[in-house]
Image (cartoon, helix red, strand yellow):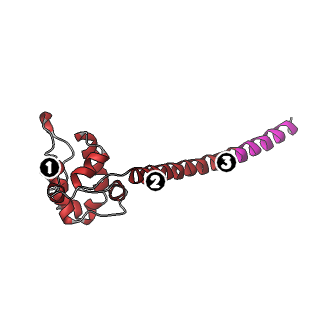
Amino acid sequence: MRDLETKELRKLPERIATAQRNASVDDEKLCRLMGWTLTELMAIKTGERIPSAKEMRELYGVFGKSSRGTLQTRWPDGSTPPLRPADKVILGDQVEITEADRLRVENRQLQERIRGLEERIDQLESEIQRYQRLEASLQAVTRRLGRGR
């Protein structure tokens, strides 16, 4: 299971997202196949939680395993992923995706977006300060040149 090796582990959230996108499997469908709640999936996608070896085997059952031993993210020649549900789902232990879970995930996504926007605002404010300093020094040079005539 190369996906759980140290250097491959940080790529796993991106691999899962790519596999989902290329297989047209949304978050809720993946949760139903894996027996996860939406918040568990979000924790895995952000790297806060690492799937267990058993969960990785189940993920390979959903998307397949590449020749490199990692999660399959593309399927050549129009083939499709296996989309085989996890054992616990087959045995009837399906997780209900509740509205509260959906709202928690949406709230988390909005908080991440707000953090990103706040960082961008900070960047823009520092650029404005830099431009103001440049403008002030340009005015000082212009005054000196005006006096030298």
The secondary element bearing badge 3 is classed as helix
Badge 1 amino acid: Arg
First in sequence: mark 3 vs mark 2: 2
Whether the residues at callouts 1 and 2 have beta carbons within 8 Å, the answer is: no
Badge 2 amino acid: Arg
Q: Which mark is residue 20?
A: none
Viewer-proximal residue among 110 and 143: 110
Q: Which residue range is magenta in the image?
A: 132-147
The percent coordinates of residue 17 (x first, y second) are: 30, 48
Viewer-proximal residue among 89 and 79: 89
How far is mark 1 from mark 2, CA to CA? 29 Å
Viewer-proximal residue among 84 and 16: 84
**Crowd class of label 3 (few under 14; some 14 to 19; many from 20; radius 10 Å):** few
Q: Which mark is residue 130?
A: 3
Indicate whether residue 11 is drawn in magenta. Answer: no
Q: Which mark is residue 84?
A: 1
